Image (cartoon, grey):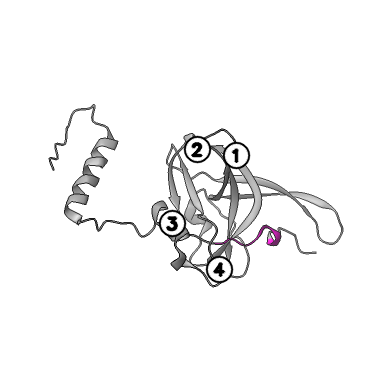
Amino acid sequence: MSTNLNTEFDQCVCDIVQQIVDAQDEVANNNNHCVTSCEQSIQQLLSPQTQTVNGTNTTIPFILYCQDCKPFIGNGVFQDELGKSGNTYFGCVETPIFRAKKFVEGSECCVKLELLLPVTAGGSTPCPGGRDVCDYFPGNSIKDFQSTGICITVDLNCFCSITCLDPITPLPVSSFTMHEKD
């Protein structure tokens, strides 16, 4: 393989990274797989050897990054009952974790995403104080993800990168509750 790194300004970062990957492939004897990647997550989801105690995983959660390299934090509003009074209120959730539901009919890049909330072993969701993905994963407390049933429609052309998490089966929408205690 000939690696001719061009120092002219017309050389794109994409071209340089492609040359780096090609060089690494040549010397690594194809032993350069990622432990966590979208390809790995898809392979795990489809593999019968990766069954869980509760059956087959159903979801590959992922994080999208905007063109400014910041994570996209999805927001959604829900309506819920306030205790036993029967009164309702509107609440808001935010999360950087999504589940792809389906593409909008006739579109290749417009997709409906469900908001997934990180959940601790005790069943609570962290209240992030910042706009970073790690704020949603304090310490080693996150044990699951909660389906919210709250969906947003996004144009995937607006994002520049994606990070996939290992396949999971989120807690069902029926267990999503933001009820305040009476």
Mark sitting earlier along the chain (3/1)? 3
Asked where in the image residue 171 lies, by quadrant, the reply is bottom right
Along the line of sight, which residue is nearer the eye, 6 or 170? 170
The residue beneath circle 2 is 156
- Residue interval drawn in magenta: 169-175
Residue 161, given in percent of the width and then of the height, sits at 42, 43
Q: Tell me where residue 19 appears, x and y as whole percent.
A: 21, 41
Circle 3/circle 2 CB separation < 8 Å:
no
What's the distance in space between the residues labelled 2 and 1, CA to CA? 9 Å
The alpha-carbon separation of the residues under discs 3 and 1 comes to 23 Å
Q: Earlier in the sequence, mark 4 or mark 3?
A: 3
Res 55 label: 4
Residue 49 screen position, x and y as percent: 44, 68
Comparing 96 with 23, the one in front is: 23
**Rendered residue at 27%/56% (across/down):** 32
Residue at (36, 60) in percent of width and height? 35
Closer to the camera: disc 4 or disc 3?
4
Would you identify the image quadrant in which residue 3 lies?
A: top left
Mark 1 element type:
strand
**Residue wearing tag 3:** 41
* Neighbours of disc 1 within 10 Å: few (<14), some (14-19), many (20+): some
Q: Secondary structure at mark 2?
A: helix
Q: Which mark is residue 153?
A: 1
